[in-house]
Image (cartoon, rainbow, N blue to C red):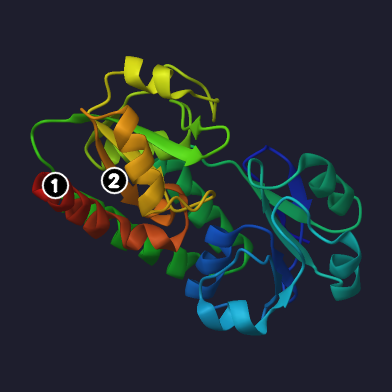
């Protein structure tokens, strides 16, 4: 039986998988784009892409609270997880019964490695390579302004949380032509409005996920940060590291147009 090493350096043995469960939204979409319509039998309630899978596939809970019993009943021959998005104890419990392949993605290059590795794991190697080539091409054609603006990125409210310098979001901010104002912080630390003010950020991005920031949140923060341009942004474009990366470069260009048009 072939063996595969995941991004946590753990090795699993698996034949061509026919009953796959994905615990990660961005990787679920990747499996769809690799052509695994019949093989994927379970997804999370946050796996909203593609829409038809969201409506039709068996849901096994959320990314942080998967139903172990539902997964057992589906009897998968492969589970695909992620170090950050899933709970370690749940992943380890599942790994005692099933082959679990876990990703750890903090940069665009690591995302390419993940896509390539999963392509090999599910025997869709050529499709995975083709997808990586397409994504690289789109990022290569990305036209960015010469002046790099300093931006803070909020992922949560009550309390506010930002993205630090060792996250995938940080790397995507860089590829999108921004400098992370919280680059000196690690992972997703709490941050106050006063601390945001002290970063001297020119831009403040309010993400659509995991916290769904809205227009009134932007207006509320604008009162405290009158010198900062505040924008609602599509969190999927900054934090999904699967095939959604195909759409990120065009979105980043449109975001710069939006910022330049903002009074």
| Horizontal arrangement in the rendering, residue 80 relative to residue 66 (left or right) | left
Could you tell me how far apart the alpha carbons at marks 2 and 1 are, in whole angstroms? Answer: 9 Å
Q: Residue at 54% across / 28% down in the picture?
A: 187
Q: Is residue 48 visible?
A: yes
Residue 231, numbered label? 2
Q: Nearer the viewer, residue 107 or 90?
A: 90
Q: Residue at 54% across / 30% down in the picture?
A: 188
**Image location (x, y in percent) of residue 8:** 67, 38
Q: Nearer the viewer, residue 68 or 38?
A: 68
Above or below 61: residue 169: above
Above or below 252: residue 54: below
Q: Nearer the viewer, residue 125 or 142?
A: 142
**Image location (x, y in percent) of residue 44:** 68, 65
| Horizontal arrangement in the rendering, residue 211 relative to residue 38 (left or right) | left
Badges 2 and 1: C-beta atoms under 8 Å apart? yes
Q: Residues within 10 Å of mark 2 (few under 14, many from 20)?
A: many
Q: Residue at 68% across / 53% down in the picture?
A: 81
Q: Secondary structure at mark 2?
A: strand
The residue tagged 1 is: 262
């Amino acid at each position: 039986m072939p063996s595969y090493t995941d991004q946590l350096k753990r090795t699993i043995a698996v034949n061509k998988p026919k009953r796959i469960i994905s615990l990660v939204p961005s990787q679920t979409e990747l499996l769809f784009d690799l052509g695994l319509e019949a093989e994927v039998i379970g997804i999370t309630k946050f796996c909203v892409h593609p829409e038809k899978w969201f409506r039709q596939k068996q849901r096994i809970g959320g990314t942080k609270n998967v139903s172990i019993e539902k997964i057992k009943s589906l009897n998968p021959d492969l589970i695909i997880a992620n170090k950050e998005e899933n709970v370690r104890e749940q992943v380890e419990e599942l790994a005692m019964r099933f082959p679990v392949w876990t990703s750890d993605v903090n940069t665009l290059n690591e995302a390419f490695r993940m896509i390539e590795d999963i392509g090999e794991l599910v025997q869709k190697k050529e499709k995975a390579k083709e997808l990586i080539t397409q994504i690289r091409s789109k990022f290569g054609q990305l036209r960015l302004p010469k002046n790099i603006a300093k931006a803070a990125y909020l992922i949560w409210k009550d309390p506010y949380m930002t993205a630090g310098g060792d996250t995938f979001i940080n790397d995507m901010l860089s590829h999108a032509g921004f400098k992370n104002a919280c680059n000196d912080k690690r992972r997703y630390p709490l941050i106050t409005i006063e601390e945001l003010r002290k970063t001297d950020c020119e831009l403040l991005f309010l993400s659509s996920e995991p916290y769904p920031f809205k227009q009134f949140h932007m207006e509320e923060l604008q009162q405290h940060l009158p010198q900062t341009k505040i924008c609602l942004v599509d969190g999927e474009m900054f934090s999904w590291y699967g095939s959604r990366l195909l759409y990120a470069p065009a979105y980043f260009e449109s975001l710069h147009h939006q910022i330049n048009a903002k009074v």
